Image (tube, rainbow, N blue to C red):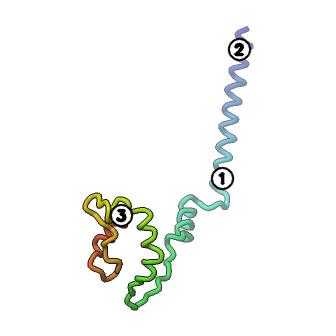
Amino acid sequence: MKFRLLTAMFMLASGVTAAQISSVATAQEFASSDRPTLEQLKAEGAFQSSYRKSIPQTKTFETPQSDLNGFRAEIEPALKQACYDCHGSENAEGDMRIDTLDPDLLHGEDISWWLVLRYI
């Protein structure tokens, strides 16, 4: 009985050792293959990254012009729908009336208010 137990343990141990040897051989084969290293892959990824490519900027030296008609047609209707109920002539919550702000977003007297409103 002890002989069978010893034989089984010996066979098990030799099987584990053989498995370890074959896995080491596989690792050595992998290391000696023509595959790129991790550092090479990182360098290639950084080289091809879209974050490294410059985006062409179009430079313009024209002074922007106010578009009061565009404001009245596109922005004011949205403000009436979303803001005037709470910040209009009938109800000025927080002492803020949007309906009285100067619509000139570039050169008007209320530019600082418009800048604050874009974060609300």
**Do the residues bearing badges 2 and 3 touch, measured as CB atoms within 8 Å?**
no
Give the amino acid type for the residue marked by disc 2 in the picture.
Answer: Leu
Query: How packed is label 2: few (under 14 Cα within 10 Å), some, or many (20 or more)?
Result: few
Instruction: Point out residue 92 in the picture as x, y percentages from the top left corner.
Output: 29, 61
Frontmost residue, 38 versus 22: 38
> What residue is rendered at 52% in x and 67% in y?
46
Circle 2 sits on which residue?
5
> What residue is rendered at 47% in x and 86% in y?
58
Name the mark nearer the viewer: 3 or 1: 3
Name the mark nearer the viewer: 1 or 2: 1
Give residue 21's quadrant in the image: top right
Query: Farthest top residue?
Result: 1
> What residue is rendered at 31% in x and 65% in y?
89
Query: How packed is label 1: few (under 14 Cα within 10 Å), some, or many (20 or more)?
Result: few
Query: How packed is label 3: few (under 14 Cα within 10 Å), some, or many (20 or more)?
Result: few
Circle 3 sits on which residue?
119
